[in-house]
């Protein structure tokens, strides 16, 4: 069973002006595709060839893990975004908003802490809003391909802070990319993961 590159849940230009179609083309069409293609090469002829992507991530090591985790992280990331015209950005509601208030003291405090963590994350990686095993929310940063999927935290929301996620649009200005991210964040998706 080959791992497929999932289609985007919106048109490639739908995140503009916050994230350009050119960035989406490179990020989804080149970077994520490369992880999927390389993973398919690596799993051919192994017991992993019949596994679901999540199971490969949880069981693989080395290059196979890196490519599987990046394929999964990216598929998750695209779901974390929603065009501003289609309801992206704004504020969370319901149980997610209550959990954010309890854990962080409100959405603005969450955003501040999330951005600070993203700016402190050295090199390439990811910043996550996660739900801990006991139910509370927390933030986590992972380096390179690492993902909460391999631990006990349940990922709710992710922001890719590898330079390929923002360099075309914002060059090395990660802070500007984070501003853009909040304009297209998909709170409904985050809530659905609780």
Image: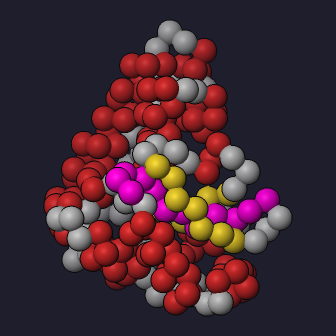
**Residue 179 rendering spot, x and y as whole percentages:** 34, 80
* Left or right, 112 with reference to 29: right
The reply to whether residue 83 is in sight is no
Q: Is residue 84 left or right of residue 137?
A: left
**Residue found at the very far right of the displayed protein:** 134
What number of labels is visible?
Answer: 0
Residue at 74%, 62% in the rendered image = 132
Q: Position of residue 134 (x, y in %)?
A: 83, 64
Q: What residue sits 69% from the left and 47% below the top? A: 151
Name the quadrant containing residue 77: bottom left
At a point 61% along the width and 51% down the height, the residue shown is 148
- Residue 104, compared with residue 19, is above or below; it is below
Q: Report if residue 189 lies within the magenta region.
A: no
Q: Is residue 74 shown left or right of residue 153? A: left
Residue 12 quadrant? bottom left
Image: 46 above or below 82? above
Q: Position of residue 160 (x, y in %)?
A: 40, 58
Quadrant where the C terminus lies?
bottom right
| Residue 127 among those drawn in magenta | yes
Q: Which residues are magenta?
A: 122-133
Q: In x, y percent, where is residue 21? A: 20, 62
How are the colours assigned in the image? secondary structure
The answer to whether one can see residue 90 in this image is: yes
Frontmost residue, 116 versus 36:
116
Q: Residue at x 42, y 61 (%)?
A: 121
Classify 76 as above or below 115: above
């Amino acid at each position: 069973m080959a791992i497929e590159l999932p289609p985007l849940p919106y048109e490639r230009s739908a995140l503009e002006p916050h994230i350009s179609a050119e960035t989406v083309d490179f990020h989804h069409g080149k970077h994520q595709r490369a992880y999927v293609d390389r993973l398919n090469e690596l799993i051919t002829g192994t017991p992993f060839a019949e596994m679901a992507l999540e199971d490969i991530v949880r069981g693989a090591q080395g290059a196979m893990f890196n490519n599987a985790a990046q394929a999964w992280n990216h598929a998750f990331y695209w779901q974390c975004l929603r065009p501003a015209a289609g309801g992206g950005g704004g504020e969370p509601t319901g149980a997610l908003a209550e959990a954010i208030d309890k854990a962080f003291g409100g959405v603005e405090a969450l955003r501040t802490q999330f951005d600070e963590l993203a700016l402190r994350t050295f090199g390439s990686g990811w910043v996550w809003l996660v739900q801990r095993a006991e139910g509370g929310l927390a933030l986590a940063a992972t380096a390179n391909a690492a993902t909460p999927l391999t631990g006990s935290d349940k990922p709710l929301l992710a922001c890719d802070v590898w330079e390929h996620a923002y360099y075309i649009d914002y060059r090395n200005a990660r802070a500007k990319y984070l501003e853009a991210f909040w304009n297209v964040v998909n709170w409904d998706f985050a809530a659905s993961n609780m």
